[in-house]
Amino acid sequence: MPKLRLSSLYTLMAFVCIFAAGVYYTHLSIVADRKEQRLLMEEVVGVQAAAIERRLTRSLSSTYILAQEVRRSNGQFRDFDKFAEEVMQTLGGVSNLQLAPNGITEQIYPLAGNEKGIGHDLLYSDKRKKEAWQAIESKQLSLAGPFMLVQGRMGMVGRNPVFLEQKGEPYFWGFATALIYLDDLLAFTELDQLQQKGYAYELSRWHPDTGQVDIFARSTRELDEQQVTKAIRVPNGEWTIAMSRPASFTLPVVLGILFSALIATLVALLMHRILREPERLRQLVKQQTAQLELLAFNDDLTGLANRRFLTEQLDRAILNGRREGQCLALMYLDLDDFKRINDSSGHTDGDRLLMEIARRLQDSVRQTDLVGRLGGDEFAIVLVNVNNADNVRKIAEKILANIGRPVQLGQHEAVVGTSIGITLAPEDGTSSGELLRNADLAMYDSKRSGKNQLSFYNARMQEQALYSVRLEKALRQAIEQQQFFLLFQPIISLASGRAEKFEALLRWDQPEQGVQNPGSFIETAEQTGLIVPIGYWVLEAACRFIQQQMQTGKTTRPVAVNLSVCQLREANFATRVEALLTRLKVPPELLELEITESMLMENVDLAMALIGDLKRLGMRISIDDFGTGYSSLAQLRQLPVNALKIDRSFVMELETSPVDQQMVEAITAMVHKLDLKVVAEGIETEQQRRLLRNIGCDYGQGFLFARPLSPEQALHYQGYDDAGNEKVAAAS
């Protein structure tokens, strides 16, 4: 019974507190709404005041234009009507323009309806002569009005005094005057639309004669007490615009009280239930806390330690190892070609693969070691209390073997390798940041060495990383300063010896180190994405060489250009190539693009889509370095390519290796069945040329025929004869 009474008391207290808070919030809402309404009104008033100011300034600028023309003509104003008409049409908002030499109106445009104004003396006969004299004294534009004009409309008159020079002294010539109707001025504002929406407004000024407030424009509805005013600057004076709008409250008091009572009742009932079930609540809090801890320290897919927890534990292991004189090792693992499996099998199978890899990693190490997933397909392992590097190597080799076993994914098996980078502490570093960086560098060294292997960190890797940073900077400068150039290596018909086409070869004229081959910088260019602008430069330079051939009037030979995998991934690559060919007026069949077999195998679907787009443009496509990417005959049949280039590794020992001869014969026969041409790369001896010609290869390329040629040399190169001589056309 006491617990029930205590629960009811707490419930009542909760109801009273929440109800009071709701009522207070209602009050604050009303106050905030009023403040918001005022801010809105200030913005609206500011916009309308600015519109009046801008329009009036623009209209009165006509007097400055007239005054300038008077000064230019030294008071001998000709073609006033034509000039005034052009000014009024340009500026708008002006009823008429006048010239008043010595203050007496002599010219008015338009004259119709304003004839009585001719001869009017602004300095003595005009009711607003005070403003006229004020303009002369201040030598500035003055504005008279608004007042009721003889035309029966409210308007303002702007008088701009004009001074000319005589014998070096200024003298008053007269006035350049503009008449502006008030309703024309207000038509450029939104006051009429705002009035229809419930707004009220007044325009007023201090009357120069009476010193009283003169309201010269107002809405049909009166202003409310909650009004906002804004000053409008006009020549020799100031106007005031005031606006108001009936207040509208978004949360009426009665509705706010009812809503507060409803919320207070619901919360009180909820609190009553919570107080009666404290044990359930404690259990719920305990469960939620456990889930939060799991999410904070574990990867949600694999259940392994996440990056944050692994880093914390790594720092702790470093401290313990330093205190107890023990060593530890950190492994950084990245799955090889995981993206290919993910793209071909789907993300669901990709997740299954990652979970299986996580299980195998845990089975490969001790319970005292820590396995974590850093993100994507990257994992890390902390090995504590290791004796030497050989023990770490054995564990890494065990991991390579376990991960290399096939993984069952639905109806098919997947085989994936991993590249492992290893660093030791305290030998290589004394912080988690250093060790993770070193292990990452070692892992990339494994990738570069051929994947599915391990590498230990050494100082050379750090130097290589720094070299890559410097090389990236130098490549960016090379792009900006156009330090690249092309050489062209002929591709010869093995049957006739004629040069049938050229392959464009990129070179970099490095200011400090001289001419560099692509092998020294292409990898860094691809890793940093700089290969994309470099690749487009190569395409344009190749097209310009094709133009040079066309201009000679002789046979124009196609030019082959190697594509990078980064260009292959560009969605708009084909569109950009088409635009380049159109701009330089190069026939598409004269530009041939080479895609390596390994790049083709990395993403067959993407490559087929790109090749299809390029073929529709009329371009030629060839597969480069064939024999290194393990593509199948079925895949070749699906690709709309024109030629296939046998990798130089099959040609190097062709004279002495029967296996290589059989491979080249098989590839040639297979490709000819597909109605494709065959090109053999790396031909350096006459015997290699004869063997390849007898096998049936269509074309050859190599130092036997010619080393890479400059554009000028390539223009005159004709081919290679059976006597082993280059055939070169005489320069024209």
Image (cartoon, rainbow, N blue to C red):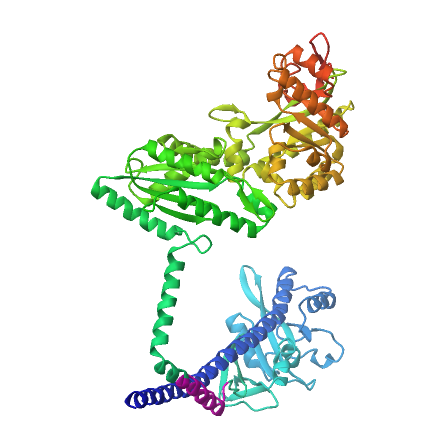
Residue at 64% in and 68% down: 62
Tell me which residue sits at (47%, 45%) in the image. 357
Location of residue 455 in the rendering, given as x and y in whole percent from the top left corner:
41, 33
Of residues 411 and 517, the one drawn nearer to the viewer in this rendering: 411
Q: Which SS type dominates the magenta stretch?
A: helix
The single residue placed furthest to the top in the displayed view is 723
Q: Quadrant of residue 288?
A: bottom left
- In this image, 606 relative to 139: left or right? right
Image position of 246 (left or right of 422):
right
Quadrant of res 526: top right
Image spot of residue 462 (x, y percent): 38, 34
Whether residue 153 is situated above or below residue 174 in the rendered picture:
below
Residue 728 or residue 393, whichever sits in front: 393
Residue 416 position, x and y percent, is 52, 40
Eyeballing the image, is 1 above or below 116? below
**Residue 144 sits in quarter:** bottom right
Q: Would you place residue 158 above or below residue 517 in this image?
A: below
* Residue 724 within the magenta-colored segment of the rendering: no
Q: Give the side of residue 599 with respect to residue 90, left or right.
A: left
User: The C terminus lies in which quarter of the figure?
Assistant: top right
Asked if 595 appears above or below 238 in the picture, the reply is above
Q: Is residue 263 located in the magenta-colored stretch of the structure?
A: yes
Camera sees residue 62: yes
Specify the segment rendered in magenta: 251-269
Q: Quadrant of the N terminus?
A: bottom left
Residue 677 seen in render: no
